[in-house]
Image (cartoon, rainbow, N blue to C red):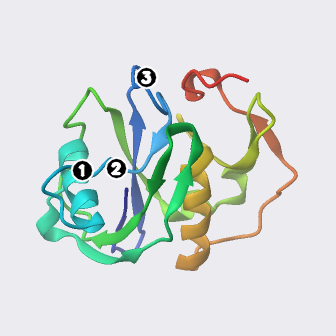
Amino acid sequence: MLALISDSTRPDIVLTRRNATLRYHAGQVSLPGGRAETGDTTLVETALREAHEEVGVDVGGVRVVGTMPTSHIAVSSADVTTVVASWDGSGPLGVVDPAEVASVRRVPMVDLADPANRARARHPSGFTGPAFLIPDLFVWGFTAQLLDRLLVRGGWSRQWNRSRTVEIPDDYLGGLRG
């Protein structure tokens, strides 16, 4: 995965909404990225290639900052390493692979940090975790956990009401009901 943050006076991050027909995490919000392919020599190379294939980012203008610790996603049985990178934010982005990506959004970090946009999401199975309520976008699960960590590490984090709990909208569950 690639956490691509613009290096600007109002930094934003690139998020995708996964296609609703995918086998795993259908309809959910994610960072650009995917599985390594033969020929990828590093996780950084995988993240950059996948971001280019999914949202069209010009990888020549991307500066890799580092990587987050690897996390295991049980539902898809995948180990995920997130590559953190910056870019000038000027290049065009959009859906390149509609089989994987339904939409692309750039969300300002200040909007993610806004306490009014923060809550805890409750899954029908009982899982609760951080969530972001952005207009026309509901972020929960691994992506929300990762964004929460990025806000802290980037110095954008603000206090928010951690007792505020919301249900995950059905179209963001990706077939993962209870």
The disc placed on residue 32 is 2
Across and down, in percent, residue 171 comes to 56, 22
Amino acid identity at mark 1: Glu
Q: Residue furthest right?
A: 163
Q: N-terminal of the two: label 1 or label 2?
A: 2
Across and down, in percent, residue 151 comes to 58, 69
Amino acid identity at mark 3: Ala
Is there any visible trace of residue 133 in the rendered image? no
Q: Nearer the viewer, residue 27 or 151?
A: 27
The disc placed on residue 50 is 1
Cα separation, mark 1 vs mark 2, equals 7 Å
- Residue visible at 76% across and 41% down in the picture: 127
95 vs 84: above or below: above
Cα separation, mark 2 vs mark 3, equals 16 Å
The disc placed on residue 20 is 3
Q: Nearer the viewer, residue 86 or 83?
A: 83
Quadrant in the picture for residue 94: top left
